[in-house]
Image: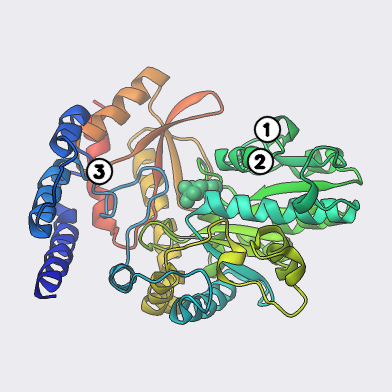
Amino acid sequence: MEELSRLFRLAAEHGAGYRRSLPDRPVGVPVDQDALVEAFSGALPDGPTPPERVLAELLAAAAPGLVASAGPRYFGFVVGGALPAASAADILATGWDQMATNAVSSPAALAAEAVAGGWLKELLGIPASASVGFVTGCQAANTVGLAAARHQVLAEAGWDVERRGLPGAPPVRVLAGAERHGTIDRSLRLLGFGTDVLEPVPADHNGAIDLGSLWEKLRAGPLIVCLQAGNVNTGACDRLREACELVHRYGGWAHVDGAFGLWAAAAPATRHLVDGLELADSWACDGHKWLNLPYDSGFAFCARPEVHGAAMSYAAAYLVGSGGVPEGADLTAESSRRARGFAVWAGLRELGRDGVAALVERCCALARRFADGLGAAGFEVVNDVVLNQVLVGFGDDARTDRVVAAVQADGTCWVGGTTWRGRRLMRISVASATTTEADVDRSIAAIIRASV
Ligand SMILES: *Cc1c(COP(=O)(O)O)cnc(C)c1O
């Protein structure tokens, strides 16, 4: 047991030391992936290795291949940092090693989920009566939301999809914005719809769904519409109030993929961007992006808990709604689950309502600072910077790719490249709780240096 304490202390101290080093280390150094694999490799040992040596070997092998994505100047993908209390709570989740399947397997884990779930709904403006499954990320949350949608639109057509599957089922139409996230397509594959079912709805100038085009495509019959809060390139949010009202007028199910954009609801300055979100039927959101929770953490909300449970429960569906309240693993695609609720509870407790709002507003202000600084330097900001995403062009595609690569190699900050509307662009995403104005200014200077 002495040894376990030593090991835990060592791991925690290394983790904390690594975090402390983040502001000063090169953000994304190029690595030789084969050499990294080599450092981890060796034949499967026949016998045991002392745990402290295992840890030492792991530390040595991993160090050169770590990316400072939890640091203040990582602007790739949509990656947030990890709040201190939330990170420590996640270490405890490991120490406690709870199986968060249900309240029998871990009463504490389910209690933390229950309270944190209520706080999440309050912050996001999702009805308090909605159910929430704690999942691995927004991919999983999209799958859960669309499974609930599949259940309901087919139940209304007289078809029990959980029992009978899709062969022979009434056809379901699935509409989604042309600029939906790729995880929507994968969720539809996993749910047996296939991607051919998707009818893309054209996007407006900034990548949100075009309402007129949506309306033209709507007809009665089993219908699922995937809406989006936070276009992964531009940050644009669909006009959820009008879109949900339209979808409901035709009896459809409105699902909102709001991996990061749903957090606009938590800040007074951005709340209008997701006005009407409460009208949707299901919502998918991430904790590990803008909320700065440690990986992995996502939330699948459903306006109708009984539908959520009927689609996902792995106890018999008939138990749900007849006294049994769906909880824990009845609301996700996992059976045994990590106790993610501790980190969610801790992160929300650490920030409080005002802290979440300040985090969202600060990131948006820093995104605008990027846009203003790079615009002033003569580069083209291509999107309307409505949220935390900035798209920048540096002339032709080849030059933009060269600038992105040079910025990445420089190591001051890390930005990604993307293709949007046929053009190669630099994509900057501000989502970390630790990013400051000074970090943005240093990064702008590095980007300008890389462009010459
Ligand atoms: C990141 C993202 C997803 C996928 O989320 P994961 O956490 O990676 O599973 C889905 N939709 C949008 C809009 C995203 O930005």
- Please state which of residues 286 and 355 is positioned toward the viewer in this rendering: 286
Judged from the image, the secondary structure of the residue bearing numbered disc 3 is: loop
* Disc 2: which residue: 188
Q: Earlier in the sequence, mark 2 or mark 1?
A: 2
- Mark 2 and mark 3 lie on one chain; the one further toward the N terminus is 2
Q: Is residue 2 above or below residue 397?
A: below
Do the residues bearing badges 2 and 1 touch, measured as CB atoms within 8 Å?
yes
Q: From the image, state whether disc 2 or disc 3 is nearer to you.
A: 2
Residue 49 position in % (x across, y down): 11, 52
Residue at the location (7% across, 54% down)? 53
Kindly identify the amino acid type of the residue bearing the numbered disc 2. Leu
Residue 228: x and y, percent?
63, 49
Left or right, 403 with respect to 353, comes to left
Separation of marks 2 and 3 at Cα, in angstroms: 35 Å
Of callouts 3 and 1, the N-terminal one: 1
**Mark 3 neighbour class, 10 Å CA radius: few under 14, some 14 to 19, many 20 or more:** many
Q: Position of residue 201 (x, y in %)?
A: 73, 36
- Amino acid type, mark 1: Thr
- Count the labels in the image: 3
Q: Is residue 161 left or right of residue 384?
A: right
- Which mark, residue 195? 1
* Viewport quadrant of the C terminus: top left
Determine whether 127 is above or below 298 in the image.
below
Q: Is residue 388 left or right of residue 130?
A: left
